[in-house]
Image (tube, helix red, strand yellow):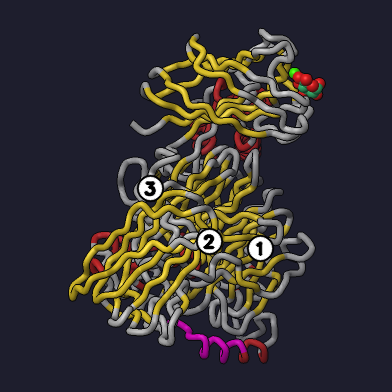
Amino acid sequence: MTFTARRSPRRWGPLVATALFALALAAPASPGSAAVDDSAQTEPRVAADSTIADGLEAMVSDYETRVPTEYTTDSWTPFAEALTTAADVSEDDAATEAEVADAKTELQTAASGLEPLQSTFATITNDTFWNDTDGNPIYSQGGGVFKFGDTYYWYGVHYTGAEYYRDNPTRKYDGDVRFVSIPVYSSQDLVNWTFENEVATTSTSLGSLGGNLGSAGWVGRLGVAYNENTGKYVLPVQMWHPTHDHGVLFLQGDSPTGDFTFGNFQRQVVNSPTTGTGDQTVFTDEDGQDYLIFSNREGRSRAFVSKLRSSDSLYAEPAVEIGRHGDGREGNAMFKLDGEYFMCASDLHGWNTSVNYCLESTQGSVQGDYSDYFTMPGTEMDYSHVTQTGFFVTVEGTEQDTVLYAGDRWADFAWNGIGYNQWVPITDEGDGPQFHSVSQWEFNATTGEWRVGPDNNYILNPDVQADRIIVSNVVGWSRTGSGGVGNVEGGANGSRFALHVNNGSGARQEMEVPAGTYTLGLYTKGSGQVTVTGADGRAHVLNVPSSSGWTERELTGIELPAGTATVTVDGGSGNLTADQFSLVRQGGEDPDPGDSTRYEAESSPAVCSGTIDADHAGFSGSGFCNGDNADNAYAEFTVQASAAGTATLDLRFANGSSAARPADVIVNGSTVETASLPTTGSWTGWTTQTVTVQLDAGANTIRLDPTTANGLPNIDYLDVEQASG
Ligand code: GCU
Ligand code: CA
């Protein structure tokens, strides 16, 4: 979300946008003589200082902290070589800038190939304000996450209004987008973020343009690209400046977390009809080529993909238009999934929430043909988890590819609920991307796997904030009676809106739930009934007695089978106003899944009495343990427990033989049970068997000892999950 200038915060409504579109159609596609495109033709103004060697030195000392026992040997070897070379170049005073850049690129490439032996699920909780690993607020909007080497870096803008909003979320602020800084955070798991630096601040100089970032009227919408040629990290950001006009400001730094300095200012990208950009992000393709993804500033009807110049990334080359829509689209961002490119964007109606409108490449070419706009499935029920399109991160995991959708909830301007950053997974369900609107989920950045979190709220648009305006049909809820399903101002706990049903009308929502025992929670005013009906047809009714003020209500012990559950809100013979709905699974079968740790059977400290093979597809990591066909041919894992207590072991195996291959599970020398390890039909038929054991604090050995002369099935890994204490 951006706007043109702080002093004129009025946004283009759809009607204005349509009018602009008509004008845009009448005008020639190229800028023509009316739009002066000076900086597009001139050479970039490159900052004079060159501290590229410092960047390499910082990178080397960071990578020297990696430990070989944590990675597969195959991935460690090239990394260790690149690290030695880079360290040599870093210490060589005679090294040229080109040699330094090459050493950086090679080290970064080798580091990006590092394959950790263990991987962990970490929890993303939406609808909250996020903190960094020091417990300080994360202020990052309109930016992007980029992977350099083995580390993710998150850049975005810190605005003054974001602080006010966090201090008091139950009011609207009037678009206070005063620029504070561009912070950068780093993470290995995309969940725990460590604050590194403010790469730019109000005092960052605008170089030959004159002035500093503090004198700009708008700074926002940015990304970072690594340039292999210069060894620099380039940050294109939208800027509007009272004396310098609209344009793309290119800052650059010598390390992902260093101080960035002025690189270039490009007022207009060739083929875009206006100066500046509507909204923009940076997309890096698998081949390392970086692109600016943007819409034209006024009207925003056209979507563009522009290559960043390969010599230094400080200039956006003539843009290729990939789609048009008269209503205008903004928040433009790109991801790649299963060989096709997707450019998705939001409505054009000002700091608001929106479905994701996407274009899909039809030939697998980033600047080639694209489909017409379509709505990404899963974004309609609650306007993309009450956000505007922010950016995407494609995670190529060892098990699956998952795209992380990073939505911006510009709540300080629009008052749409708690938390700025709402991240959810997107997967390919066979017929294109599917958006999973979850309030809590667990993600494994190594394997790419995700699962719904234990405290997920299965009700969508539960706080009735998605519409942001008074409507007669609230998004996500459908009517059951004659009246509409409206919203009213004055929600529970100071929130902005609540759901309102009159005498004779009602609202319902359907959702897919896993089997379990659930708790329904909500706040009500007035009287009526709220019913949860399971896929088995059983109705669980909460009668709401009359109250004039907001009252918290709860119904526990709701047994639901897996399948579609329905929540129905009824006014009965009166009026019911309801807000802050939750339908959350109670702990039970899965006592706080917490974080599980994976131990691969093919890697030390695991022991395999047999061979490490890789001839049956579908295994995790680099292979599996093929135990000898003998009754003493065991597989043994050494696992760590942070405290003594119960742990769940998920053993993954394949048994292509026709008989079960039972094995004793021996924990620290004592047999605790015999795992059945039945046939799985084929050697590629990998499956998981769960065993619950007691572990000591610290290291524990877990041995699988076959009870027959057939030996073990092929063993892939052991996932260990400790019960919460
Ligand atoms: C086959 C198969 C092996 C397996 C073995 C066995 O040889 O390819 O992966 O371990 O059978 O019976 O154990
Ligand atoms: Ca075998």
- Distance from disc 1 to disc 3, alpha carbons, whole Å, reads 37 Å
- Vertical placement of residue 212 versus 576, above or below: above
- Image location of residue 509, percent across then percent down: 46, 69
Q: Which element type, helix, strand or loop, lies under badge 3?
A: loop
- Image location of residue 36, percent across then percent down: 59, 80
**Along the viewing direction, whichever of 252 and 402 lies nearer the viewer:** 402
Q: Which element type, helix, strand or loop, lies under badge 1?
A: strand
Q: Earlier in the sequence, mark 1 or mark 3?
A: 1
Q: Earlier in the sequence, mark 2 or mark 1?
A: 1
- Vertical placement of residue 719 versus 604, above or below: below
Indicate whether residue 415 is drawn in magenta.
no
Q: Is residue 122 something that shows in the picture?
A: yes
Q: Residues within 10 Å of mark 2 (few under 14, many from 20)?
A: some
- Image location of residue 222, percent across then percent down: 50, 60
Please, what is the three-letter code of the amino acid marked with disc 2? Thr
Q: Which residue is mark 1?
A: 342
- Vertical placement of residue 475 versus 597, above or below: below
- Distance from disc 2 to disc 1, alpha carbons, whole Å, reads 30 Å
Ligand 1 placement by image quarter: top right
Q: Residue at x 45, y 47 (%)?
A: 453
Q: Which residue is mark 2?
A: 564
- Which residue range is magenta in the image? 11-21
Q: Earlier in the sequence, mark 3 or mark 2?
A: 2
Disc 1: residue Cβ within 8 A of ligand 1's nearest atom: no
Q: Quadrant of residue 329?
A: bottom right
Indicate whether residue 12 is drawn in magenta.
yes
Q: Is residue 92 something that shows in the picture?
A: no
